Image (spheres, grey):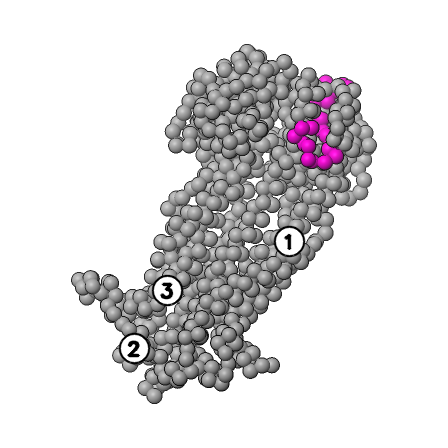
Amino acid sequence: MKKLDVRLLRMVKHSKGQFISVTVIVAVALLIYIMFNMTTINIGNAVEHYYGTTNISDLEVELIRIPQTALSDLKSIQGISDVQGRVSVDVPLQVADKDEKVRIRIMSVPEGGGKINKLYAPKGELPELGDDNVILLEQFAKARGTKTEDIITPYINGRKHNLKVSGIASSSEFIYLMENEQALLTDPKKFGVAYVSETFAQSVFGYRGYYNEVLITLQDQDNIDDIADQVEKKLDKYGVKRITKLEDQPSNNILMQKIDGIKQMSALLPVLFLVVAAIIISIMLSRIVNNDRMAIGVLKALGYSNNRILSHYTKYALAIGLVGSVTGIAGGLFLSNPLSQVFVSFFNMPLAGLQIQYSYIISGIFLTSIFCIVSGLFGARGILKIMPADSMRPEAPKAGKRILIERVTFFWRRLPFSWKMVIRNIMRNKRRFAFLVLGLALAYAINTVPLYMSNAMVTMFKVQYEEYQKMDYTVEFSKPLNERAIKDISHIIEARLIEPKLEYPFELTNGWRKKAVGIIGAPQQTAFYKFVDRDNNVVSLPDNGIFITEALAKTLNVKKGETIVIRSFLPGKDDVVLVVANIVKQYLGSNAYMNIDVMEELLLEKDMVTGVNLATDDNLKEKLKDVKNISAVRSSGDIQESFEEYLDTMIAAISAYMLFGGILGFALVYNATIIGISERTNEFAALRIMGFDKKDIYGMIGKENAIMAGVAILVGIPLGSGMITGMAESFSSEMITLPVILTPTIFAQAAAASVIFTIIAQLATLRKIYNLNFIEALKSRIS
């Protein structure tokens, strides 16, 4: 081994505490990078395998009624591979607890299981379906503890049907079990899917020889928009309600959002960690080079070139990068397995093996090495200024001068001596102090993000269901009814307020941009909906025109005052051009809103309603469970309850993110303190002679760290605000609009976390101060 390499090992051994703390940061960066990227690969493989095995539909068409014989016409469209019809209707389910309201979606399956959206049975083959048995969706069966041979009792058209559970299976279209786009949280205990024979479904729902949904698979995805247009034209006469592409399918949409979120985290967090590691490495090497001044002079005198000595110290930085890389990669590969398992388990699909993508390992090592080498060169650049002869003499002290604050004599005279020492030391090392502040500010900003996410989720649900939508219940009819249905309902239940609701899917078009969404018609002076524009002004539904939500406006690239084309799926209805009267806030889902009277006149039929919104204390679900033509009864309370269960999972994720920020803060403060102690040993020894005890000296270091943390928090506030805004922008989608919330609580909690980690880091250096040999340091200075 070369002499310089032996010296390098001694350097590592001498500074092992700092070496380990920086290596941990690099290791965490690589761990996050590898773990998240390997997980997304494994999930992608699982999705591809599962979708391929079950032959998931590329297009799903909801319509009023289509005869079985009409399906063969669709196959004439070039690009369509397979077509399959089915009956799908939501009904209530009778359960042991009468107060518990459970809904189940009855879906027909062709004889033999069909070719599209095939059910997946990990534990063997599925039984044939008859008139008295069902196959239950796995998530629902697990949540309710239902097993094969059990009996379930759905209410279908006011009648109870006792059906035996003959099998349990999973489905690729329900990997995230959602009742609809509005109910974003999965609640498999209260909503499930039961698969029945086609004959049974057509018989009990009155669809003999007909379907109300069509599933389509394509030969390739390139022309999906054109094919969807052709399908719509061909099925127009059958009352098309909505055509949903796979990318817009709610379950798939949620899955893709989660994968995108992981990808974004895998790209952002490692870079932040490596930037902080680079700052620490640079400061560490700067201090080491300064301490090794005489040794460097000797090396130069012996004939070692600047480049050779520079590379020797850069190897120290590279060693941190390589050790951290190997450790982080090993940890990332190890943790990617359980994380992938948890993810696919959450989405209820099988894991199609674990894959290691070596390109990520190579790119991770390369990226880390670049960061470490650059920071090493920056930190060790002082080598170039050291001359052999000069290095034999003690370094001339830096020229001192009065700092700015000293000119404020009234204030300066009243400062205790220890505080004057602290402030002067900071001002002597302004550049280093600035770098440390920047690093700690980044750690602080990282802490604000998980706190924001938890606040945003809580606020989002609270505002959505307590402010923007104030109804206690929403009742959906199974088909459009005359307004007289409202009176019928008011005779059954006792409601403080009841409003008609008209909700129907339409395609909104702006140029080449188009989106199929539900337009909701409400009374102009509605008591249940509160519309708030982008300037937080409360606005009312216009006489003419349409309100669209922010997410929809972004998708269509349309602004207030511009026009959009509303394309109806109903046969015989012409396209309607409407002015966007305003763009309103809505955090969950993506909709458009109209005055119900105008909507009836322009888009549908007079006196037509598809549901009602109610304010009531009555037991609505119990009283309406046997009422015909009601497809769903939803309460805001159920959604809130589901969200509270979801919060438990979110708190665990927030704790993990806070830990990342804490590791950064700890490593920064620990290294800064160790470097400060190392550089100022002689100064501390002199203070001891003057009567300062170890506690006083430790207190001075604490004051420096307190100032650094305080300034870092101030700098970190705009950094955190920027990260929060970017996070809200990148995580918002057509289904969720994350509000940008910049409350003092978020920044105060992040500050408290930063202070705690700073205190912990300083406590870790306590032993260094108490073990300092002040007498030896003083002797060295005197000699």
Query: Which amino acid type is shown beneath numbered disc 1?
Result: Met
Which residue appears farthest toward the bottom when viewing the image? Answer: 783
Q: Quadrant of the N terminus?
A: bottom right
- Give the structural element (helix, strand or loop) at label 3: helix
Mark 1 or 2, nearer chain start: 1
Residue under numbered circle 3: 431
Query: Which amino acid type is shown beneath numbered disc 3?
Result: Arg
90 in the magenta segment: no
Give the label on residue 687, or none. Answer: 2
Q: Is residue 660 visible?
A: no
Q: Residues within 10 Å of mark 3 (few under 14, many from 20)?
A: few
Q: Is residue 228 found left or right of 99 in the rendered image? A: right
Give the label on residue 38, or none. Answer: 1
The residue at 47%/56% (across/down) is 661
The residue at 20%/63% (across/down) is 407
Magenta-tinted stretch: 206-227
